[in-house]
Image: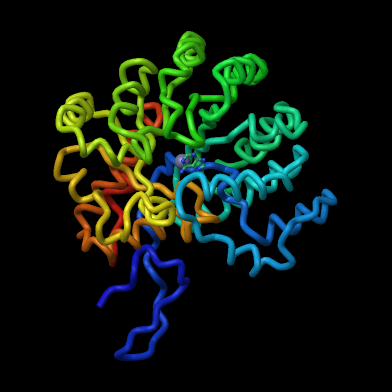
Amino acid sequence: MHPLPHSLDQSFRTAEDQQVIPSMPPIPTAELHLHIEGTLEPDLAFALAERNGVELPYATQEELRAAYSFSDLQDFLNLYYALMTVLRTEDDFADLTHAYLARAREQGVRHAEIFFDPQAHTARGVEIDAVIRGIGRALDAAPGTYGITTRLIMCFLRDESAESALETFEAARPHLDRIAAVGLDSAEVGNPPSKFREVYALAREAGLKCVAHAGEEGPPAYVWEALDILGVDRVDHGVRCLEDEALVARLVADRTPLTVCPLSNVRLRVVDRLADHPLPAMLDAGLLVTVNSDDPAYFGGYVADNFTAVRDALGLDETTLRTLARNSFEAAFLDEETRAAYLKEVESWSRG
Ligand SMILES: Nc1ncnc2[nH]cnc12
Ligand SMILES: [Zn+2]
């Protein structure tokens, strides 16, 4: 009997001898699909509400947690945008990011590529400079304090206009040295990637990488648009690609990574149960799949929790877990030397 490699538990007591033996460390991973606003835990939300004099429509953290039952993506987004109104100052964004990094370290994250949603803050009167400086301060400290390398990905809200995305890109121009890539998130259906072709062209011209949420709730046609019109380097979610054989063949041929988020897919009812998740089918099809946490404060777990959950629900063996971890570093926006060092860590990881 082996200790669970991905357990958050600090120790493990064997049934046989009642000895406490340390649990094995979680598998080293790159987290590539993580919304920093989606890491806002109830305790920090209440602390920031108090600090900033924001009134929350929940009396207690338990009451807030009780609202974490979602019928679909939009139902979740309503709460996600409402709760992030506690984030107002540069310090708030720094505190939020530090809290995530501390948890990520415990979960085996060695490299994190972090989304943020500037329009969700500028629409409330928060300066984009405060958002980027606050997150940036924590990211600057990440290698030294947490042993984690990072990249920052600026997302456009696809249910806002193309003009608003262009204005946001221009407002962020003074900070482009801090931004590795642009992304596209929020309500997918009815907001196809093609709506944002202009701002993605500008981003690419500026030397940024490009990613986009596609094929979460939206159809395979949105994944095609993300590839052919936006020229994305990775697809976020992409689980619905399996409905289109030619699309799967294209993704496999190009080795385009898909950042899959299993616990998110269950909580947002993209799949009914984790046991029905298409992750094994995606791996069997030869897709470059990674496992990520999306909005872990809302969906019941961080990245190692997602690994544990899919291992248990889908019966993934150690070889498959290692493949998923290796994929995460292959899909990351890393220089080759750093990538090779992380891949070595994956190979030497052991469940004990
Ligand atoms: N899962 C998700 N899909 C789309 N937009 C999001 N914003 C935060 N989480 C998201
Ligand atoms: Zn997401």
Question: Total number of numbered labels?
Answer: 0
Q: Is residue 320 above or below residue 143?
A: below
Decide which of 245, 19 is in the foreground and name it.
245
Q: Is residue 326 visible?
A: yes
Q: Which residue does the image show at 40% across and 43% down from the upper left?
A: 30
Locate residue 274, reporting x and y percent: 31, 59
Q: Quadrant of the N terminus?
A: bottom left
Q: Is residue 56 above or below residue 198?
A: below
Q: How is the image coloured?
A: rainbow
Image quadrant of residue 12? bottom left
Locate residue 206, reporting x and y percent: 51, 11
For this orientation, the residue located farthest to the front is 190
Locate residue 132, reporting x and y percent: 66, 30
Q: Which residue does the image show at 72% across and 26% down from the upper left?
A: 129
For this orientation, the residue located farthest to the bottom is 17
Q: Which residue does the image show at 35% across and 55% down from the upper left?
A: 27
Locate residue 18, reporting x and y percent: 38, 90
Q: Is residue 154 visible?
A: no
Q: Which residue does the image show at 80% across and 51% down from the upper left?
A: 54
Q: Quadrant of the C terminus?
A: bottom left
Image quadrant of residue 212? top left
Horizontal placement of 24 versus 115: left or right?
left
Image quadrant of residue 238? top left
Decide which of 48, 2 is in the foreground and name it.
48
Horizontal placement of 175 versus 210: left or right?
right
For this orientation, the residue located farthest to the right is 53
Horizontal placement of 121 versus 230: left or right?
right
